[in-house]
Amino acid sequence: MIRRTKEMLVTALIVLSVYAVKGLPHVQREVTVSTIFESGGGTVQVLSSNPVVISVKPHDEGSGGWSKVWWYFMVDQLVPGEQITIQLDRGEPKSGGISPQAFFSYDQEVWGLTDTGHPLLSDGRAFFVYQHIVRGDKVWFAYDLPYTMEHVERFLLPEVKRHPGADIKELTKTRQNRSVPYIVMEDKSSGLPPQYGIWLQARAHAFESGACWVLHELTLWLLSEDPLAAALRKNAKIYIVPVVDVDAVVEGRTGKYQKPHDHWMEWDVEPEYWPEVGAIKKLLRQMADQNIVDLFIDFHGPGGASHPFFIIPESDKLPFDQQRINRSNFLSTLKAKELTDQAKQSQSMNQIHYSERAWDNQIISSSHEWVTMRTNQHSLAFTIEVNMNTPLSTREGYRSEALTLGRAISAYFTNKQHNK
Ligand SMILES: [Zn+2]
């Protein structure tokens, strides 16, 4: 009898320990995870409910490194005040970009950063571990500040619709039959054809959500009554594609290095595999026929904890003198600096830098290379790396980056710095 009581007591203690949360009232619960929502991604598993330990593998496009970066998931049945541990499994070959701090939210609208995580080697396998004390029973965690098509539809397109000089059009349907919207701003009051043309696009690489935030804020500024924005709209027809790879963004994929190639690469291959890239090139060719491919910027990330920067070819590889002169004028209007090792030691969201990359101009692959070689002799074409994954990479930080760019673009064109 005594023995049986003891067994019952042990059993009861085990049951209690399974359901008890350390230091908190006893609760009966089973922690659950989900990625079934827009941009939800990665492979997520509950390793333990008490204490809460979650394993996440980034979404993998199959090429290792920067092809496995994105993850975004929800955890439910948590107890406010308890600590959650997230083990990011870097796999073999190891995943690429690691966010030193992960983003968390209790409503998918207001986001914060966890404390800085730490690397962990266990049984020869590389992990990166985040810990966070939760303040609600349901929490979302993400590799970076998410930006989905819902953001476009809820917070961007309604602003465009309110503006008399801006239209929303459909660029194309994706391979998965999703609509890809784009925005056109044009001041037709003069009755004359536009003097300049500007093309802005983001998210050729789906995991680079920060790129969308900069373009989102830049679009809002371009629609605004700021005199510099109004002056630019008077001079230039502006095309904006808020999200290029809609399928990968909606499906919560990494996007970069996807097969057969991603949306930033192989732009010279025809017919185009991606309808989005084919439709963008078609419109750029129409602009080139009107001699108005004046500025093209493809927004990417991450720039890391230093500064946003343009990836540019070496000056002597540019095929036309006008491009060389215009590039120099634009970079000086922007007060852009070279991204040296010393510059990388400091950090900002609004001191734009540039980094020259070796380029054999006989081989055209990336978007900015295609625009440089295949549109107008005066075209300025850039890929910009916005700096994601830093404590400054907030909505306000991205806005300051957008305003720096917008004001400089306006000054460049309205002060007649662009030769053609
Ligand atoms: Zn990219």
Image: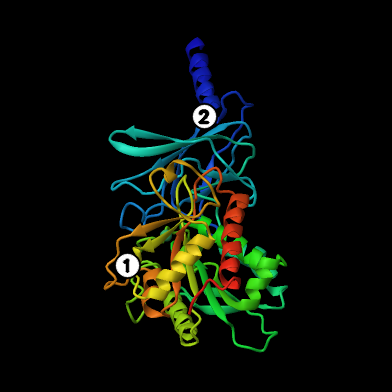
Find residue 229 and report its horizontal and vertical position in percent: 66, 68
**Image quadrant assignment for residue 398:** bottom right
Point 44% across, 83% down: residue: 285
- In this picture, is 69 found above or below 148? above
Find residue 192 and report its horizontal and vertical position in percent: 63, 88
For marks 2 and 1 on the same chain, the one whose residue lies earlier in the sequence: 2
Return the residue at label 2: 18
Q: Nearest the camera: 322 or 306?
A: 322
Mark 1: secondary structure: helix
Point 59% across, 34% down: residue: 28
Mark 2: secondary structure: helix
Does the image show residue 167? no
Return the residue at label 1: 316
Q: Nearest the camera: 355 or 134?
A: 355
- The type of residue carrying mark 2 is Val
Cα separation between marks 2 and 1:
67 Å
